[in-house]
Image: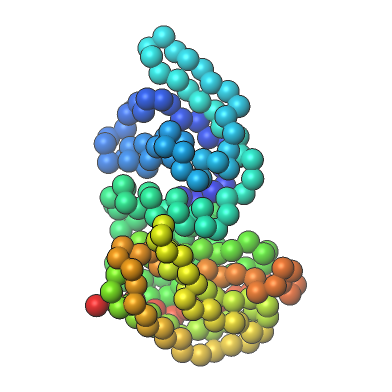
Amino acid sequence: MHELLQADFLTITVPFIPHLPAREQDIVQVVMQAFVEDWPFSRDFKQVEQFVFQAGFQLQLYQRLRPTPLTTVLDTFWRMRAQVEPTGWWQQPWLNLNAGQDWQIIGRMAEPNRLISTASTAKPRLLAYYPAVSGTLNLQARVQASGCKQWQLDLIIWQPAFFATRQSLPLQAALQQDWSVQFELPDSAMLVLALLPAAEQPAAGSCHLDLSAVRVTTH
């Protein structure tokens, strides 16, 4: 996902041409679907070239027009999640939606319990909880923050017909506290943690956030 958000150019073939084992092709194919089916994500690009081959397929080249906004990032991941079966590293419940090491996920593969992020620029740091959640959600964590004046930690619930930030925790230059939230979710909702600037220009320096003893339960 983060590779898509960072890409300045994308190429797709129409119709889709498989060239890897079926399971590995799922993500490649869903990118093609995003453009053919006109997902909101595809509108952040423009087609700049098209090659038509005698074999009956087209190779299309797209160039990015603008950064993908937060709501479109969540919409795209929600759609991909519905079509791509998690395997390998994707079997862990938390997935970094940014490039690089914006979030470190520490602990056992199936139950990581420590999430760390360091932010020095104003871009949102997004961490999605991959399993679909519904019913009553409980999230607990021990929050430690340093250098985080004018930053906040948001708990976002996403579904195409339902978008709300249900909980926002203002961070401080130094903070250490237990954080616990509980609320009712719509069916097949997606849970996202977002480290966001609380002001247009956050304070200079780096915000370091460490969430330990992280536990997510639903019933």
State the residue lying farthest toward the top: 54
Image point 60% across, 69% down: which residue?
196
- Is 81 left, or right, of 62 in this rendering? left
Image point 38% across, 49% down: which residue?
80
Up the image or down, 174 lies above or below 93; here it is below
Residue 201 figure quarter: bottom right
- Residue 172: percent from the left, percent from the top? 64, 84
- Residue 18: percent from the left, percent from the top? 32, 29
How many numbered marks are there? 0
Up the image or down, 177 lies above or below 19; here it is below
Up the image or down, 131 lies above or below 30; here it is below
Whether residue 28 is visible here, answered yes or no, is no
Whether residue 99 is visible here, answered yes or no, is yes
Image point 70% across, 72% down: which residue?
199
- Residue 104: percent from the left, percent from the top? 48, 66
- Residue 70: percent from the left, percent from the top? 55, 58
- Is 134 left, or right, of 213 in this rendering? left
Q: In which quarter of the image is the C terminus?
A: bottom left
